[in-house]
Image (spheres, rainbow, N blue to C red):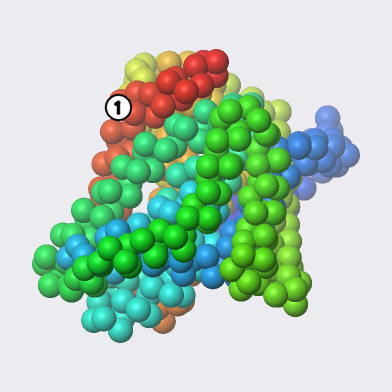
Amino acid sequence: MLICGFLVLVILRIPVAFALGLSTVPVVLLELRLTPFILLDRMFQSYNSFILLAVPFFLLAANLMNSGKVTDRLIELARVLTGWLPGGLGHVNVAVSMLFAGISGSSTADAAGIGKILIPAMQKEGYDTRFAVAITACSSVMGVIIPPSILMIVWGGVMQVSVGALFLGGAIPGLMVGFALMATVYGFAKVRDYPVTATPNWGEFRAAWKGAALALLTPIFVIGGIVGGIVTPTESAIIAAGYALILGMFVYRTVQAKDLGVILYDTARFAAISLFAIGTASAFGWLLSFYNAPRLIVGLITAWEFGPFGTALVIAFLFLIFGLFIDAIPTIIILGTVLMPVAQAGGIDPIAFAIIGIVSLAFGLVTPPYGLCLLISAAIGGLNVVQVLKEVTIILAPMLLILILIAAFPGIVLWLPKLIMPESF
């Protein structure tokens, strides 16, 4: 009844956060052992987590970076680094998403901030609008893979896994995704004869680095502070937001005091949506545990004896399917907690399990019917989502290969955490 009720509400296009909460109501009313206060208590317990305070502060940092024109400086740096390649602006799109991912931790902020600038620029230089929209959407998903990542912070808080180790575990897969996307852009450029943007001279190169250098210090403060044990994830998020505010108001002087109201409102709105979903998803997940769903799933999968690689593929497949319909944060709380014992029984390290899950969920940001980054990019380009599905499918193919490689060779994920944070194992 619980799952069927949720699916019916989703089909009726009820927002997922509300659907998760509403689907628990009939179960509580019919089950004599439960009361509404138990579920309310579970919701409030899920909010009683210091680490979740990092979510609104990272969103605030991303909004401040976008409003402070930091994105423009990152685009200029990406242009001098990659614009000389065939399909120059496509490479710039991917490169700036990699740079922005290391600052914001938010894929939607990436798609919105970069898309508003680069999609019109690519259209102006003769790129197919469908390709411009597709590469903007697909490259923006690196925001949840390359550290710092909001999803990794939520995962660490919910699963009690070291956030610093998760950040290090996502670094190499994130770079692999970025280079795979650039190779795909190169292929499109050769087939469709897309132009080279420009070959920069030394003066342009030096000016671009100088303009973006202060912004690029953000991931050093954030990741270095957490990995070094100097600050907690929440404290690092506060530092990132404060640093972004200082850059925007006092260094670059592109954020005015009158702009702060809109920035804070947008941040509060998006943070409220995410945090409300955490509460309702926690209540939903607790009911699944109440009826022993995790134990049944563990028994079913372990009985098939897939082995570590087969179990990792099953886990990735389930995250991919859930990500098509549900936002990543509720999926982590519901499916992640259910599959954690499955991963342990299959011999998969918790950090490798987390990165497999997060990379799988990244696909959901660019695949209908959820596909939030794809919806944002398509709206900027003035297209319907269906019109860009062919290009999106082609671009996602190398990413799928990387996901399979991560599942087959978890050492790709674990090498850096074991090297820098061996105490996490």
Q: Where's the N terminus, which quadrant?
A: top right
- Residue at horizontal 49%, vertical 16%? 422
Q: Can you say whether 35 is above or below 89 in the image?
A: above
- Residue at horizontal 21%, vertical 53%? 183
- Residue furthest to the front: 203
- Residue at horizontal 68%, vertical 34%? 232
In which image quadrant can residue 386 be found? bottom left
Q: Can you say whether 225 is above or below 60 in the image?
A: above
Image side of residue 385 versus residue 342, left or right = left
Pick whichever, 358 or 79, lies toward us: 79
Pick whichever, 354 or 237, lies toward us: 237
Inspect the image, locate mark 1, and give the three-letter code of the amino acid beneath it: Ala
* Residue 372 percent across, percent down from the top left: 50, 62
Image side of residue 187 versus residue 9, left or right = left
Q: Would you name the residue on which mark 1 appears?
A: 408
Res 354 seen here? no
Pick whichever, 247 or 332, lies toward us: 247
Pick whichever, 121 or 73, lies toward us: 73
Q: Secondary structure at mark 1?
A: helix
Image side of residue 50 versus residue 206, left or right = right
Res 190 seen here? yes
